[in-house]
Image: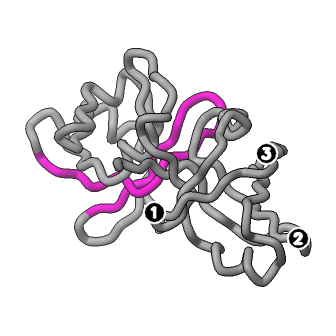
Amino acid sequence: MDFMEVGEVLKPQGIKGELKLKPLTDNPMRFRRLRVVYFDGIPYRILSCRVDGFVYLKLEGIDNRNAAETFVGKYAEIDKIHAVSLDEGSYFIADLIGCAIKDEHGVVIGKITDVSNYGAADVFTAVTQDKKIFRFPFLKRVVAEVDVCKKDLIVSRSEFEAVCVYED
């Protein structure tokens, strides 16, 4: 089975074993259609789901806070067969993470470590080979090509340098 991460468990919620997840999707309401999620390849049936910025899942067999604590830091996954179909030019965050960022001449700039959405555009967080963290928006004028099969993201060097921000 080919799995795809859809959420990260942040903490237990309450005392009955509910999990609070950070969704790794642009539409957290998709969680409501799920019947099963996987943790470490083990399927868990979803008994209830609510979405309020974060996603709150109640899973079969996780009946108290202590059991829920063991999931903190783990990623909820789905079988990729059950993933939604994407429009042309749209990508799964899981497919973008790990992509090499290269300029139009093939020079490697860094590697994508996270994707966040702040409304106007997705923002890539990446790291250079010497561990410098930087961010830039996913804009058509910046990103020339995305090839998730090759794990490459090609950027226009001049546009990239105009919008890229490095951490101190």
What residue would you read off at disc 1?
Answer: 41
**Horizontal arrangement in the rendering, residue 159 relative to residue 119 (left or right):** left
Q: Earlier in the sequence, mark 2 or mark 1?
A: 2
State how many labels appear: 3
- Indicate left or right for 162 with 153 as reference: right
Is residue 14 shown in magenta?
A: no
Q: Nearer the viewer, residue 12 or 161?
A: 12
Over which residues does the magenta segment extend?
Answer: 107-128
One can see residue 157 in this view: no
Q: Nearer the viewer, residue 142 or 95?
A: 95
Residue 150 pos. (x, y %): 17, 40
Whole-angstrom CA distance, mark 1 to mark 3, is 26 Å
Q: Are marks 1 and 3 in contact (CB under 8 Å)?
A: no
Q: CA distance from mark 3 to mark 2?
A: 21 Å
Residue 29 horizontal side relative to residue 6, left or right: right
The prevailing secondary structure element of the residues shown in magenta is strand
The residue lying at 64 percent from left, 48 percent from top is 23
For label 3, the SS is: loop
Q: Earlier in the sequence, mark 1 or mark 3?
A: 1
What number is the disc on residue 53? 3
- Which of pointers 1 and 3 indicates the residue nearer the eye? 1
The answer to whether 17 appears left or right of 8 in the picture is right
Residue in the image at 55% along x and 31% along y: 121
- Give the labeled residue for mark 2: 16
Q: Check residue 126 for magenta coloring.
A: yes
